Image (cartoon, rainbow, N blue to C red):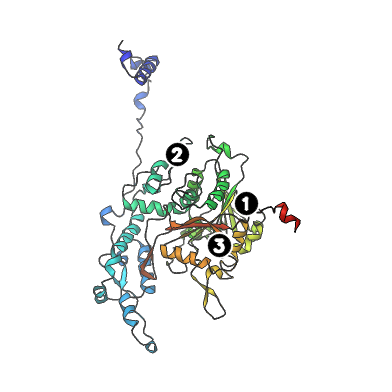
Amino acid sequence: MLLSRLPARSVLLRSASLSLPRKPNNANQHRLIFSFLRKNKKPIAPTEAVPILTEDNLFHPFSGSPFPPVRARGEAIQQLAPCPVCAGEHTHVHAHTQARPRAVKFECPDCGWPTHCSEEHWKEDPEHQKYCQRLREANEDEHDLRSGRRLREFELPGPQGYEEAISFANWDVFWYTRGFNSMDTERSRRHASKLLTYPITIGSALHQYSNLTLNNQRLTPEGSRSLAALRSTLHVEPGAPETEEAAIGKPQVRVFILGARAESSLPPHVWEQLTMLFPSTHFHLFFIGPQVSLPKPPKNEIEVTTKKSEYLPNVYEPPTPAPISRFKRTRDSLQRYGVPSYTVPYTPQLTITGMQANYADVHAQFQHTLDPYSDVFFMFSPGFGFPSPESVDENGQPLVQIASPTEWGPVLPMLLASKCSIFVTGFSPTDVERDIRSLSSAPQVSGEFEWVITPGPNSFGSEKWEIADFDPRVMVKTNWGIWAIRGKSRDVQERSSVFRLFG
């Protein structure tokens, strides 16, 4: 009678406990004769390293930072950035005086960045307060990454259960439904969003539960048809479980990331998060661009890792990232692609290939196999509308990069001819608008494309401010906006029998 009043789960637990063999009351019967010589080995709990900097001690001027890379960045800024007050004064000086603004030397006591040539000009500049708080935030973020604390926001979750749905509404909901550690601070959010913005931007745009839909007018009817073809390969049939076994017999999905720089230096386990959004798909990522990061040479790997790394300034033309680590299955692909390249079969669901070359030089190897059902292109902040440093028009004026024959000029017509979707991101509203305006003046591009995703903010852009070393007032957020196009489709229409008589 007493058991009948308990919940069903309690009944099962109690019945299970009653069926287990009971431990003898006399424990001395099982005591070994030499047990007094045996040491009790207690498990030692792993102790976390003591952080170099605590949370309340993250702010340091660049020149007084305890970390050499931060001090090196401060020195680079002092060589590149002009004083904003001097620059404003020299705009009224005659050109024949050849006056130039002095470089920044004085570090703002509120943000710690070198911002002015002297304390007097720092006091005279009323505009500095508009961006001082962001600079201080970036200062503390840089020191926090090197503080030595356990970065729980970088502990990435494993595979997703096939019965667990993922939401792509925003970063918060995604982290929750994906099983990430709790992002307790805004700083943790900035760190995690910067690390994951590249793979999750791709995943959120291609997934069937993407937040870019017809309802919010981000997805166009033409784009819906284009993505439906791609999603038929990315996902299983309705009602079937998304498991690794379902990938058998499906074609490989190739993601071409053109003009790759920083994204090519991300560790492969970060890109593995993309495959966990599509458990039944085998991805092959292609990083293609003249600044793709290649693996370290196998013989000189020890020398490269022990060599003191120098700080690479964040200038207008970003440098090539440092060489990436070699993995056990990393192999050279020079013989296959004819350019400096490598291939890593990282997991059964992920293969990574890097090619240090312009896409126009390797397009011939892919043009006959490109398929809108299994191939897609991504360009992260390509700078279509920026002036070309190499090409000029007949008047001697620099061409925009989308029209330059040595940059994006020959690439866009090739991609449009494939009819595959082309996704593009920008680091600010101005950058997105500049790139879109350049489409109207690009030869063989204007009038040859249709929209897949309308321009707008990207819910999975980085939330961390990126500060330019050539001018600390220039601040952007990686992958702020996103849009997509594809080559214009021309449907074949059959002529009626009446007009056929007069043909």
Q: Is residue 171 left or right of residue 269?
A: left
Give the alpha-carbon distance from disc 1 to disc 2, as whole Å.
Answer: 28 Å
Residue 501 horizontal/vertical position (percent): 76, 56
Element marked by disc 2: loop
Residue 463 horizontal/vertical position (percent): 37, 56
Residue at numbered disc 1: 371
- Name the image quarter holding the N terminus: top left
Which quadrant of the figure has residue 147? bottom left
* Callout 3 amino acid: Gly
Q: Are marks 1 and 2 in contact (CB under 8 Å)?
A: no
Residue at numbered disc 2: 165
- How dense is the environment of label 3, judged by Cα within 10 Å: few (below 14), some, or many (20 and up)? many
* Callout 1 amino acid: Asp
Residue at numbered disc 3: 289
* Callout 2 amino acid: Ala
Q: Is residue 1 left or right of residue 443?
A: left
- How dense is the environment of label 1, judged by Cα within 10 Å: few (below 14), some, or many (20 and up)? some
Element marked by disc 1: loop
In the rendered view, would you say 406 is above or below 501? below
Between disc 1 and disc 3, whose residue precedes? 3
Please state which of residues 45 and 282 is positioned toward the viewer in this rendering. 282
Q: Is residue 108 left or right of residue 384?
A: left
Q: Are marks 3 and 2 in contact (CB under 8 Å)?
A: no
Please state which of residues 356 and 178 is positioned toward the viewer in this rendering. 178
